[in-house]
Image (cartoon, rainbow, N blue to C red):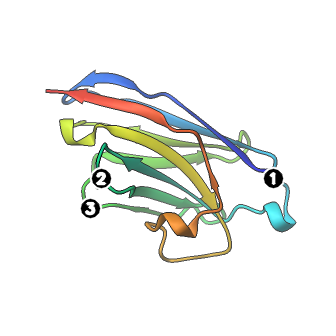
């Protein structure tokens, strides 16, 4: 069974930075194969929003317009960790952030229903 564990959330002032980590375990291939990993966020009263994705084989990345130029998703293949570096944080970035993994390939990475596995979430709070 694939497990995803997030860490790195916290409270920062606007303009600050945080780095989230997502450690993946329990997959080797077959039905547990992971093709892409993404970060989502959900603020109270709002829908879950796709923030960024990385396709593990080629390293291709995509971002939501709201974070483009400020957030960077990356992977450490050997450690099976995916990172989300968040710079120039704004109060509107405040949300619970979730790591997710999925297969097979999809271009609709921003849709929560395209993912098979989810982490428990880590809170990010940005104050003005």
Residue 27: which disc? 1
Instruction: Say which residue label 2 marks.
Output: 46
Q: Residue at x 26, y 61 (%)?
A: 65
**Most foreground residue, 8 or 87:** 8
Q: Which quadrant of the figure has residue 48?
A: bottom left
Q: Can you give x and y, in whole percent of width and height, for residue 119 in the image?
A: 60, 43
Q: Position of residue 26 (x, y in %)?
A: 81, 47
- Marks 1 and 3 sit apart, C-alpha to C-alpha, by 31 Å
Mark 2 vs mark 3, foreground winner is 2
Whole-percent x and y of residue 79? 72, 39
Q: Is residue 26 left or right of residue 97?
A: right
Task: Give the quarter of the figure containing the C terminus.
Answer: top left
Mark linked to residue 65: 3
Counting residues from the start of the chain, the first of labels 2 and 3 encountered is 2
| Circle nearer the N terminus (1, 3) | 1
Q: Could you tell me if the residues under marks 2 and 3 are in contact, i.e. CB atoms within 8 Å?
A: no
Q: Secondary structure at mark 2?
A: loop
Q: Determine the residue positioned at 44% across, 42% down.
A: 97
């Amino acid at each position: 069974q694939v497990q995803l564990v997030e860490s790195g959330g916290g409270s920062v002032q606007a303009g600050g930075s945080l780095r989230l980590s997502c450690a993946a375990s329990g997959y080797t291939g077959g039905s547990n194969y992971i093709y892409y990993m993404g970060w989502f966020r959900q603020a109270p009263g709002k829908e879950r929003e796709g923030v960024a994705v990385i396709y593990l084989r080629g390293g291709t990345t995509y971002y939501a317009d709201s974070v483009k130029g400020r957030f960077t998703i990356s992977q450490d293949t050997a450690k099976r960790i995916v990172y989300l570096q968040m710079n120039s944080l704004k109060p509107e970035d405040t949300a619970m952030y979730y790591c997710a993994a999925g297969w097979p390939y999809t271009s609709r990475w921003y849709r929560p229903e395209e993912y098979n596995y989810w982490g428990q979430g880590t809170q990010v709070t940005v104050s003005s």
